[in-house]
Image (spheres, helix red, strand yellow):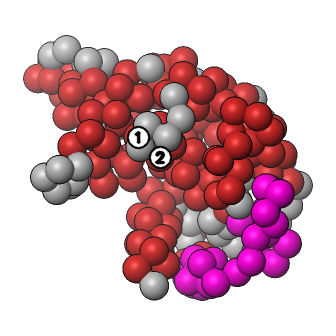
Amino acid sequence: MQKSTDRVRRLKKLKSVTGTQDGGDSGAVAAATAAAETRTSESTDTNGGASASSGSLNPEIFKHFDKSGRSEFLKYLKQQLQDTADNPVYDRNGVFKQGVSNAIYELLWQALRFTHKKDLVLHLLMEVVALHAEFPSLILDVINILDNETSLMTEGLHEERHAFVQLVKDIDKVVPESLLKERLEIDTLQEVGIVKNKSFYSKFIKVKTKL
């Protein structure tokens, strides 16, 4: 039950950073929340991929990630994109889909938990961004959530924050640095070394905003 609650919380956060399509729709939030609440009780295909009933990513693929897991992850994303118009987090009816966002979230956590090497995750992300033009932006939405979560980690869980910083330091291999500077918090940019002078960068942002 706790895992289900955590997923609902994370999806609401993701909804807040991705926004709503066409001015927003409360039904989209309800759909995402309902899907998250039922996810833990749904059966999955033990061979990997997605559950037939929910369309969610089977976490079992991470257990054999070095072999077929990576290709199954990409296959899952491609399947999700088949029901997408212009944005990978909305279906053709404009309803928010948590599947793609949650899959990327789980992938990034593999690096934060040191379950899989950071370079392996980054290499897969490079293949992910090639699938859809909106994926770089979506990845940064998820990174912003992880930024908030890891910065609030209690004592004894600081390794995840350290792993997050190391991941973001190299994320420019996947996402343009200009987009990183635009989307991430200034404090985070300074922490990972992308921005050296916080005061100067803050003034730069203000000037750029006025323009």
Magenta span of residues: 33-56
Looking at the picture, which amino acid does disc 1 mark? Leu
Q: Position of residue 10 (x, y in %)?
A: 44, 65
Judged left or right of residue 140, residue 45 is: right
Q: Position of residue 39 (x, y in %)?
A: 63, 77
Instruction: Categorize mark 2 by other alpha carbons within 10 Å: few (<14), some (14-19), many (20+).
Output: some
> Mark on residue 84?
none
Looking at the picture, which amino acid does disc 2 mark? Trp
Residue 197 drawn in magenta: no
Judged left or right of residue 191, residue 165 is: right
Residue 36 drawn in magenta: yes
Q: Nearer the viewer, residue 30 or 160?
A: 160
The quadrant in which the C terminus is found is top left
* Picture residue at 64% right of the left edge, 47% below the top: 62
Judged left or right of residue 78, residue 26 is: left
CB-based contact (under 8 Å), mark 1 and mark 2: yes
Image position of 59 with respect to 211: above or below: below
* Picture residue at 26% right of the left edge, 18% below the top: 193
Q: Position of residue 47 (x, y in %)?
A: 83, 57
**Element type where label 1 sits in the image:** helix
Q: Position of residue 85 (x, y in %)?
A: 82, 55
Q: Which residue is mark 1?
A: 112
* Picture residue at 63% right of the left edge, 32% below the top: 125
Whether residue 1 appears in this view of the structure is yes
Instruction: Determine which quarter of the picture holds residue 66.
Output: top right
Instruction: Determine which quarter of the picture holds residue 83.
Output: bottom right
Q: Residue furthest top?
A: 196
Q: Which residue is mark 2?
A: 109
Q: Nearer the viewer, residue 24 or 36?
A: 36
Q: Main secondary structure of the magenta part?
A: loop
